[in-house]
Amino acid sequence: MASQDTAELFRQIVERVRALDPVHSRKWFEDLAISRLDAGTMEVSCPDDTAAQFLEDHCLGVFTQAAQHATGHLVAVHFVGGASTGRPLSENGSPGVRLHPDYTFESFVVGPCNRLAHASCIAVSHSPGTTYNPLFLYGTVGLGKTHLLHAVCHGVRKETPDSRIQFLSCEEFVNRFITAIEHGTLGEFQSRFRTVDVLVIDDVQFLSDREQSQEEFFHTFNAIYNNNGQIVLTADCAPGEIPAIEERLISRFKWGLVARLDAPSYETRVAIVQKKAHLRGLEISEEVAEYIAGKVTANIRELEGALTIIYATAQAAGEAITLQLARQALGRQEAESRKSITITEIIDAVTRFYDVRLADLQSKKRSQSIALPRQVCMYLARNLTRHSLEEIGGHLGGRDHSTVLHAYSKIDELRRTDAGTRGQIDQLIAAIRPD
Ligand code: ADP
Ligand code: MG
């Protein structure tokens, strides 16, 4: 097949992918190309391993479908990363760690709300271990903390590809620590974490009330710090406000630079909408960006959601994204969400049913009398609302998506196997949805 034909074929495939999956489509799909095409296989070369991983995780299905449609026969699609880029983190002894290709410094909009955090992350990625150590970022959910952590890792990887980086959520750190104790592999755990060049831990508020993990984290921190390694941490509140955490940890968190992220202003929100649209290869006018930024003020994740709805509406109608269309799309969504069930309603019903307090659900308490209602909340929120796992976790004390997912499967299993739980869930659903 002539290369021109291959290029045209691939253009058609990408066009179809954009129509099938606007949420995961990115502008950089234009930089992809077919590097090999034979009987049953299509190899797609990507700019780097992170991009290949993203496609593998989110887009394999749609690409396969589109390739099948365009070629008229069954093809297995493979994504291959470029050789020019840094190694995947997993080769540096951190299996399963994946950087998100969207979360770079280039795609991060800087405004008064995040200027210090952004500048300090840039400085750290240029010279880890020498400027701000530790770097501690904090702010409420959806303000870009995790995005910045990915960006730091991208930056370090680019500038010093040999650096050994560990990047994980605090919850994962705690889980791995517990597993290491259970399996008698604490030595391995410690040599893995205490010897890295850069340790990046997201949401350290998860340490509260976990004394043994705090102790372990304290020694990890000291070992890395004394080795001139860089430590970057985030939390949903300032170091001194994290409940039930040792004073010696709090004081270490404050040793370097503590930077707060605030909610973005209107102007910053407009710029973010434009940046996100650009990233997806969408054309939107200034007035549409301003409309979205004026309408959605709560958190940045929701700005992205609004963009998706508008795009999907435009696609379905076969129209361009005009202000009028944006108004219709978001207006309809508003009307729907007014009718639909909210997480607050679910929490109200659950706290009444089990006679527990919201503060308990949001606390770190793990006794069965609290943990079960909390998990039931997560289960119902996932079933009855369209909120993301992160958002659901956010309502229940800042738990991360894996915790919510775990709760979901546990209750789902119980609902199928245990008549008592099934009865409780049915009663709750009836109470929440009275019709
Ligand atoms: P947090 O970890 O603080 O809860 P995230 O880093 O997960 O927040 O950010 C939520 C979403 O908002 C992500 O999609 C992220 O890319 C986006 N976002 C947040 N701040 C910015 C910014 N300043 N510029 C561009 N995107 C942003
Ligand atoms: Mg986060």
Image (tube, rainbow, N blue to C red):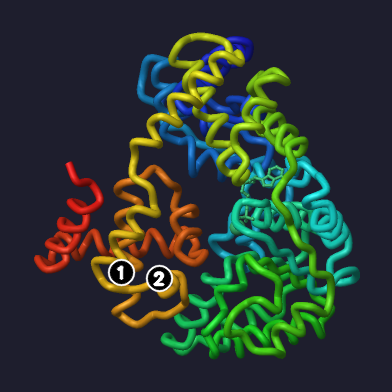
- Image quadrant occupied by the N terminus: top right
Q: Residue at x 52, y 84 (%)?
A: 209
Closer to the camera, 230 or 165? 230
Percent coordinates x, y for residue 234 in the rendering: 68, 66
The kind of secondary structure element at disc 2 is: helix
Closer to the camera, 229 or 357? 357
Percent coordinates x, y for residue 318 in the rendering: 48, 9
Residue 63 versus residue 50 in the image, above or below: above
Mark positioned earlier in the residue sequence (2 or 1): 2
Label ID, residue 373: 1
Would you say the residues marked 2 and 1 are in contact, meaning their CB atoms lie under 8 Å apart?
yes
The kind of secondary structure element at disc 1 is: helix
Q: Residue at x 67, y 46 (%)?
A: 103
* Amino acid at dot 2: Leu
Left/right placement of residue 61 relative to residue 419 reads: right
Residue receiving disc 2:
361
* Amino acid at dot 1: Pro
